[in-house]
Image (spheres, helix red, strand yellow):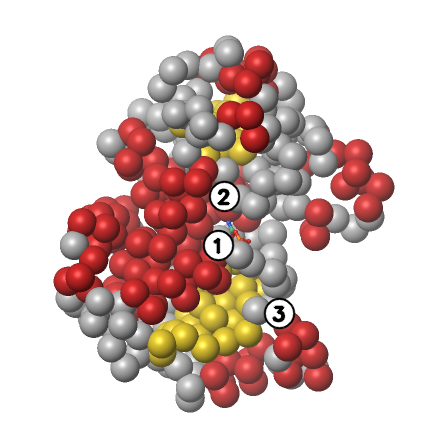
Amino acid sequence: MRNLINIMDLSAEEIDELIKLANDIIKSPDRYNEACRHKILATLFFEPSTRTRLSFESAMLSLGGSVLGFSEANSSSAAKGESVADTIEVVSGYADIIAMRHPKEGAPIVASSHTSVPIINAGDGGHFHPTQTLTDLMTIYHEKGGFENLTIGLCGDLKFGRTVHSLIGAMSRYKGVKFVLISPEELKLPSFVKQEYIKDKGIEYSQCTSLEDVIGDLDILYMTRVQRERFFNEEDYLRLKDSYILTADKLKSAGESLSILHPLPRVNEISTEIDNDPRACYFRQAHFGRYIRMALIMKLLEVSA
Ligand code: CP
């Protein structure tokens, strides 16, 4: 049995295999529509979600399986004080695989020690979000044809943005990758990510506060939302929330081959005026989430078409 807690739980070769499988699912969906017959996915979401939960559910239904779960902690017995450990022990008797999102960093690791069914981390606090990274990698693969020799700008809330932490880990394994870290001083990348995935690996990187100064150097621009739910006070959030707004005017300095990604939801950080620009990939990116999650479910349940 395998869990997916951190994107680094998957080797680069396994990620290639998942992308290949997801591409085959897109090409021949009918081959896979019974792959998970009689299997049940539980989606336990202690925090809000649109894409992750619904794409997991769509993925399992498209594989011929079934889904159950809850979409907020208040509609589960967590509201009565039940622990994650007890919740997982119980749900393990109802499902074959569990995708969980929780506001506490490390909650999926606790969960994985209380069950023998695969646990998928669907986002744990400001820590990691490995299945978003699979979605991001599939998008990069489709846009760029591979992962090497890319200059990747990560812009916005690099402190609390769990998708950023997981993407940096994943991309740190490829040759010739450079990171450009663009954030306000207060929302800089945490040292645990910078040290382990950038400095210890000798990867070239730079840090700055101005998107305009660097946009012309980038192959990929990964925009992120300022994560209101992780702030200790509203005043700080209001001061920082509009630090970066990507507009058509700012895009004039970018290269024609730039790919703009965003894990979504967006609030204000990308103007809707660029949604139809061919460089805007974020809705295609969200749609890839369904197929790469189908591939992941199949891998963790060890089923084939
Ligand atoms: N990208 C992402 O995790 O979106 P949701 O919060 O809607 O799941």
Up the image or down, 248 lies above or below 225; here it is above
Judge whether residue 222 can be spotted in this image: yes
Q: Mark 2 and ligand 1: say if the CB distance to the nearest ligand atom is below 8 Å.
A: yes
Amino acid identity at mark 2 = Pro
Sequence-wise first label, 2 or 3: 3
Q: Marks 1 and 2: CB-CB under 8 Å?
A: yes
Please name the amino acid that badge 3 sits on.
Glu
Q: 99 or 167: which is nearer to us?
A: 99
Of the pair 135 and 266, the residue shown nearer to us:
266
Q: Is mark 1 within 8 Å of ligand 1?
A: yes
Q: Residue at x 74, y 48 (%)?
A: 231
The earlier-in-sequence mark between 1 and 2 is 1
Label 2 to label 3, Cα distance in Å?
20 Å
Spatial CA distance of label 1 from label 2 is 9 Å
Three-letter code for the amino acid on which mark 1 is drawn: Arg
| Secondary structure of residue under mark 1 | helix
Q: Which residue is mark 3?
A: 72
Residue 263 shows which numbered tag?
2
Q: Which quadrant holds the C terminus?
A: bottom left
Quadrant for the N terminus in the image? bottom left
Residue at image x 56%, y 45%?
A: 265
Residue topped by disc 1: 51
Within 10 Å of the Cα at label 1, are there few (<14), some (14-19), or many (20+) other Cα atoms? some
Q: Position of residue 221 (x, y in %)?
A: 47, 28
Q: Secondary structure at mark 2?
A: loop
Q: Nearer the viewer, residue 86 or 195?
A: 86
Estimate how packed mark 3 is, as few (under 14), some (14 to 19) or many (20 or more) residues with alpha carbons within 10 Å. some
Residue 161 percent location from the top left of the image: 58, 44
Residue 40 on image: x %, y %: 36, 78
- Mark 1–mark 3 contact, CB under 8 Å? no
